[in-house]
Amino acid sequence: MSHKQLSAEIVALSTARQWDKARLEWSLEAVYFADEADTCLCGHFPIIELCVLRNRSNQAEATVGNHCVKKFMGLPSDKIFGALKRIKRKEDAALGPDAIEYAHRRRWMNDWERDFYFDTWRKRSLSVAQSDKRAQINRKVLVAVEADTKPARTR
């Protein structure tokens, strides 16, 4: 993995010409699990946890591995992937705040579902109805992740 290669690629797609400023132009647009192993902009292979970043200044997109997004760009992709893996293993497990906001922003979860989730996400003991509702929302999120269109790679 090359921070130098990643920073050069991101700067080339940015308005700013210096890494410290260029990386601040980017936000997390989408996350997905690749069907086949892919390569990060840093050169690391294989990766399957991919993040689509969007530049707020010029609308450019870049697809980067989850590890680089967290380590070098400081965006919460690792928390979102962790939550998705957790609800795949246990359908009534809780998403965390970053994953709840991400799912709501992607419209995988409506306002009521987001509010319900924030009211219950830290609870260890849910009623049967709450547990069923959480599992229903989680299934909806997992279906949306699988169905989400995987954007074309940008280099």
Image: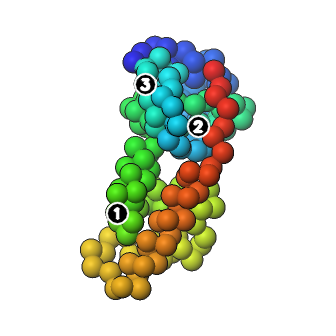
* Amino acid found under the numbered disc labelled 3: Pro
Name which residue lies at 55% across and 52% down: 145
Q: Which residue is mark 3?
A: 46
Which SS class for mark 3? Answer: loop
Q: Kindly identify which numbered label has been placed on residue 149.
A: none
Taking 8 as reference, is 67 above or below it?
below
Locate residue 60, reporting x and y percent. 69, 31
Locate residue 137, reporting x and y percent. 50, 70
Q: Quadrant of the C terminus?
A: top right
Which SS class for mark 1? Answer: loop
Q: Are marks 1 and 2 in contact (CB under 8 Å)?
A: no
Taking 57 as reference, is 79 above or below it?
below
Of circles 3 and 2, which is in front?
Answer: 3
Q: Which residue is mark 1?
A: 90
Viewer-proximal residue among 70 and 57: 70
Q: Which residue is mark 2?
A: 52
Name which residue lies at 34% across and 63% down: 90
Locate residue 58, reporting x and y percent. 72, 32
Of marks 3 and 1, which one's residue comes earlier in the chain?
A: 3
Of marks 1 and 2, which one's residue comes earlier in the chain?
A: 2
* Viewer can see residue 65: no
Locate residue 73, reporting x and y percent. 46, 33
* Amino acid found under the numbered disc labelled 1: Lys
Q: Quadrant of residue 87?
A: bottom left
Taking 78 as reference, is 147 above or below it?
below
Distance of label 3 from label 1 (alpha carbons): 26 Å
Viewer-proximal residue among 97 and 16: 97
Viewer-proximal residue among 37 and 68: 37
Which SS class for mark 2? Answer: strand
